[in-house]
Image (spheres, rainbow, N blue to C red):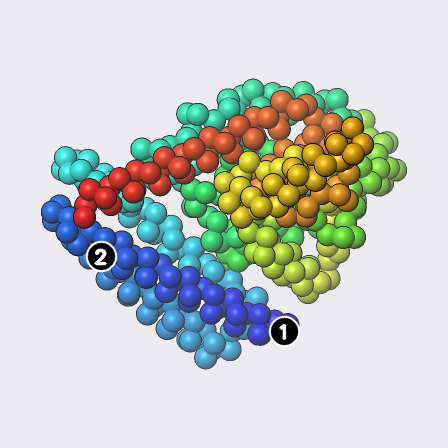
């Protein structure tokens, strides 16, 4: 697919996203038609009008860019950046609306309540206090770094724009649990991918960090590619090999892990775009590494979308036990869909494959479960509220 055709598709998707948002807002407004709370009704009417104005603005902006000759990567970044700015504006307006309601003692539904800037849930279902303690996780990470030849793991989260500020997203958990070992990059936001490229360029050389110590960085991309290396193979080549300087008095080794955060199709498209961007800049793409998860995902989307594959996987393992008295755990026997895991879980699996303790993965899985429960609570609250509003 050419860059122009791909960008046109991206632009159409962005337009459809805005149209879907408008339709969702219209549906929400309709469901409150019989609500006697005049303030909430007027708020939803105003919200509907704002979304209509936004949709027209988005289409006009796209047409103007194309008329000016914008195409390919530049057009995609411009459209995505505008979408993100709008999403942030809506997020902030929700907070301001809740503050106004609080000051006016006006009751409000969970659908328009203030949202936490960290976990992205509504304030009445915020999970920040229920997550594992940060200091404990960070201490575990630092302790293991001291015992793994001194290399430091840092997750570079490349998040799809549709995932940003979504309460159901899992990568936000890594950003909260391991703030000193993670960094967020919004895919499509103007300049973000070039910033990512700039910090992953010098992966095959050593450089001085200004203190007289040698700092060596290696980068991998997590993705289940058929030609991908295993974590062990990557470590043998990059971390344990002679390519990392061993002559300096103090050597700081940084393992940067690019994690593609989105649905499977979104992540695949992001990887395709990164390949093209790296090639345009005449830079080698970091090595692709595939994980070997041994358990099914607890992530809410995986449970919903891959539940059938999970059940087939369990039936297969039960059959293996009956036939051989030993459960087969070879990944070649596992259902591909059943072994798809969330971004947060993937980070935990990688740390385990690097030799870090099970406790870190357990904390991450616990955080995913906590997030699932908050989503269920919010859904039930919305159902109750809409039932009372009819």
Q: Position of residue 226 (x, y in %)?
A: 76, 53
Side of 372 where 287 appears, left or right: right
State the CA–CA distance, disc 2 to disc 1: 42 Å
Q: Mark 1 points at which residue?
A: 2
Tell me if residue 221 can be seen: no
| Mark in the foreground, 2 or 1 | 2
Q: Mark 2 points at which residue?
A: 30
Q: Position of residue 85 (x, y in %)?
A: 40, 55
Quadrant of image for the N terminus = bottom right
Q: Position of residue 18 (x, y in %)?
A: 38, 62
Q: Is residue 40 above or below residue 5?
A: above
User: Quarter-wise, where is residue 291 in the image?
Assistant: top right
Q: Element at badge 1?
A: loop
**Label 1 near label 2: C-beta < 8 Å?**
no
Residue farthest along the front direction in this orientation: 322
Residue situated in front as seen by the camera: 259 or 305:
305
């Amino acid at each position: 697919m050419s860059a122009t055709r791909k960008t046109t598709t991206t632009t159409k998707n962005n337009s459809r996203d805005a149209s879907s948002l408008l339709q969702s807002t219209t549906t929400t407004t309709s469901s409150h038609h019989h609500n006697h709370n005049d303030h909430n009704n007027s708020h939803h009417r105003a919200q509907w009008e704002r979304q209509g104005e936004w949709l027209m603005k988005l289409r006009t902006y796209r047409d103007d860019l194309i008329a000016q000759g914008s195409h390919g990567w530049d057009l995609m970044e411009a459209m995505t950046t505008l979408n993100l700015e709008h999403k942030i504006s809506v997020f902030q307006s929700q907070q301001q609306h809740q503050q106004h309601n609080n000051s006016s003692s006006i009751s409000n539904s969970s659908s328009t309540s203030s949202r936490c800037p960290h976990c992205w849930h509504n304030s009445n279902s915020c999970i920040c206090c229920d997550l594992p303690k940060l200091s404990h996780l960070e201490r575990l990470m630092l302790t293991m770094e001291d015992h793994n030849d001194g290399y430091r793991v840092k997750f570079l989260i490349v998040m799809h724009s549709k995932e940003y500020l979504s309460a159901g997203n899992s990568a936000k958990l890594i950003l909260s649990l391991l703030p000193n070992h993670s960094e967020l990059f919004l895919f499509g936001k103007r300049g973000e991918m070039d910033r990512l490229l700039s910090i992953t360029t010098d992966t095959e050389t050593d450089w001085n960090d200004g203190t007289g110590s040698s700092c060596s960085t290696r980068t991998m991309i997590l993705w289940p590619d058929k030609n991908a290396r295993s974590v062990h193979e990557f470590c043998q080549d990059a971390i344990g090999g002679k390519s990392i300087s061993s002559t300096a008095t103090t050597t700081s080794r940084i393992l940067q892990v690019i994690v593609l955060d989105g649905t499977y199709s979104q992540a695949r498209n992001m990887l395709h775009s990164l390949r093209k961007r790296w090639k345009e800049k005449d830079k080698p793409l970091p090595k692709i590494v595939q994980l070997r998860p041994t358990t099914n995902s607890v992530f809410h989307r995986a449970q919903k979308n891959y539940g059938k594959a999970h059940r087939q996987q369990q039936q297969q393992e039960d059959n293996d036990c009956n036939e051989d008295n030993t459960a087969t755990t070879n990944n070649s026997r596992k259902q591909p869909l059943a072994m798809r895991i969330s971004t947060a879980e993937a980070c935990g699996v990688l740390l385990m494959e690097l030799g870090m303790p099970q406790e870190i993965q357990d904390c991450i899985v616990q955080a995913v479960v906590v997030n699932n429960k908050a989503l269920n609570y919010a859904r039930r609250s919305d159902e109750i509220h809409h039932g009372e509003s009819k």
